[in-house]
Image: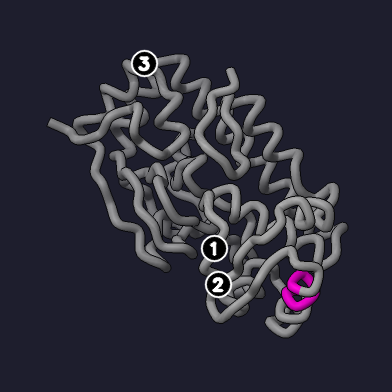
Amino acid sequence: MSPFNQSTVRNRLLRVLSLESFEALRPAMEAVDLPIRYVLTEANEPSSYVYFIEDGLASIVATSVDDEKVEVGHVGREGLGGYHVLLMADSTPHRTFMQVAGSGIAVPVDLLLQVVDRDKPTRDLLLRYVHSAEVQLAHSALANGRYNIQERLARWLLMSHDRLGRADLPLTHEFLALMLGVRRSGVTNELHILEGIHAIIATRGNVRVLSREKLEEIAGGCYGLPEAEYERLIGIPIKAGPFIRTA
């Protein structure tokens, strides 16, 4: 018998699926370790599994034809790695991989699509999640085009904090630079500024959040709307904190 129980899984989408759909997926659910750099979705390759992340943090990265890279989305316990399959696309040009190690539940794509096809509430829920992820992507573009490095860094740390649900974020300066599309020296300078106002403590390979309030104040308008849209559509908060159903 499958060891998974809907009341105890940590992935928030699985927690709010209809019981019928959860039970249909449960026999095929596979607990998987997700080490750092583990690829959930390889660019331009058909996906056999989707991943409901239980712990850890994945990045969705866009790459140009001349190999320029930038992060366009985050996936953590609120979401699903490989959600392009819900739009009937067998592959995507974006690569999704773990930037913070964790764990998850793998489900075969074929089974998920069968369940989605026969259960309208589940289909509607997961498509609402896709919409919220697209809103996040759009606001990443907005942040990159209209906000400075400090504001974008504060936003990125808040998003990571939301998805990991803990104060310690195991992130290197090099990785932060890649994800923000800036030089490492620029990230290092901005981290020092955030340390100076006691919003964070940055050490080698780790950023500890001391004050969400200060980070939210710095991020300003580039943080908050996608998070509110997720909560409106899924019925649970994406922000850091315990699982609380709001609808």
Q: Residues within 10 Å of mark 3 (few under 14, many from 20)?
A: few
Tell me if label 2 and label 1 are in contact, CB under 8 Å. Answer: yes
Q: What residue type is labelled 3?
A: Arg
Magenta stretch in the rendered image: 191-195
Of badges 1 and 3, the one in the foreground is 1
Say which residue appears at 46% left-offset and 42% top-offset: 80
Q: Which residue occupies the foreground of this view, 127 or 175?
A: 175
Q: Note whether 70 is above or below 223 in the view shown.
A: below
Residue named by callout 1: 168
Q: Which secondary structure, mark 2?
A: strand
Residue 15, given in percent of the width and then of the height, sits at 42, 28
Q: In which quarter of the image is residue 130?
A: top right
Q: Which of marks 2 and 3 is nearer the N terminus?
A: 3
Q: Which residue is denoted by mark 3 in the rendering?
A: 118
C-alpha distance separating marks 1 and 3: 41 Å
Residue 119 drawn in magenta: no
Seen from the viewer's position, the closer of residues 70 and 203 is: 203
At horizontal 87% and vertical 57% (from top left) the residue drawn is: 146
Judging by the rendered image, the residue that carries numbered circle 2 is 206
Residue 19 in picture, x, y percent from top left: 34, 17
